[in-house]
Amino acid sequence: MLILAGVTVSFGPVVAVDDVSLRIAAGSRHGLIGPNGAGKSTLLAAIAGTVPARGGCLLAGRELAGLPPHRRARLGVGRTHQQAATCATLTALDNVLLGLYRQAGPLRAALRPALRRALTARATEALATVGLVDRATVTAGALSYGERRCVELAAALATDPRLLLLDEPAAGLAPAEVDRLARLLADLPAATTVLIVEHDLDLVFGLTDTVTVLDNARHLVTGTPAEVRSSPVVRDAFAGV
Ligand code: ADP
Ligand code: MG
């Protein structure tokens, strides 16, 4: 589903992602872990197209390099951010609809009531998936932090992405919310390929079939959760974290 070939991202003198190559099979649940500042969020941004990157990035055989984020989203790249990126003054439902309108083309959606109804139904369904359908008309600013993160997840899911990029979805959630999130992620459609960055290693190891470790901008190792857990290289990378 995704092939990264020598992806490199620099911010001035800082090399945040250094020559990272990776293959992610279709339908895979792929974890991305590593110490703070390793380049995990930047790698997701490079795939989503929100930071300039060098190297190749193929989605189902199609080169994404040079395409702006909205084109990549239309090709099936969905994402959530490390900080919940909801609009505080819009309702939960409208936050989810925003992404769907963008995907459908805002003008088309504005001009076609039948399309708008279909998109609203899809947004409502996505809110139901994350357990927030009864909060649909509440503005995001009045929701709890955990609820806002779920709205962002619903917005990503509603677009039915082929590749879903999740940046620390469990960060800042209460233990009960993490459990619910884990169940939700385990129940995602089998066809959806997931790349998840997460500090909660129990969550990552429980959910994924393959795990990549980034350390200091570089690809350290990729393997099954069991292989990565027992790897001495990984233990060294996480020492002192
Ligand atoms: P992680 O998500 O693994 O904690 P990041 O990808 O956020 O790491 O950051 C990797 C490195 O790139 C860090 O040194 C960080 O300071 C730097 N960095 C990230 N984003 C920017 C940016 N927009 N401008 C400058 N430096 C950045
Ligand atoms: Mg990060």
Image: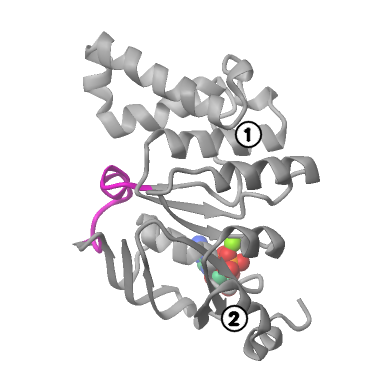
Question: Distance of mark 2 from mark 1, alpha carbons?
Answer: 34 Å
Label tally: 2
Tell me the residue at 27%/9% (across/down).
113
Queried on whether the Cβ of the residue with tag 1 lies below 8 angstroms from ligand 2, the answer reads: no
Coordinates of residue 117 in the picture (x, y in percent): 34, 12
Residue at left 56%, top 76%?
213
Q: Can you tell me which quadrant of the image ligand 1 is in? A: bottom right
State the residue position of label 2: 227
Amino acid type for the residue under numbered disc 2: Glu
Magenta-highlighted residues: 63-77
Observer-nearest of 44 and 62: 62
Task: Name the secondary structure under disc 1.
Answer: helix
- In the displayed structure, 61 sits above or below 153; it is below
Nearer to us: label 2 or label 1: 2
Where does the image place residue 53, in percent across and percent down from the top left? 34, 69
Residue placed most toward the observer, 214 or 176: 176
Decide: is 234 above or below 117.
below
Query: Under tag 2, what secondary structure?
Result: helix
Q: Amino acid at mark 1?
A: Arg
> Given contact means CB atoms under 8 Å apart, are the residues at marks 2 and 1 in contact?
no
Q: Which residue is mark 1?
A: 148
Q: Which corner quadrant holds the N terminus?
A: bottom left
Q: Is residue 133 left or right of residue 188?
A: right
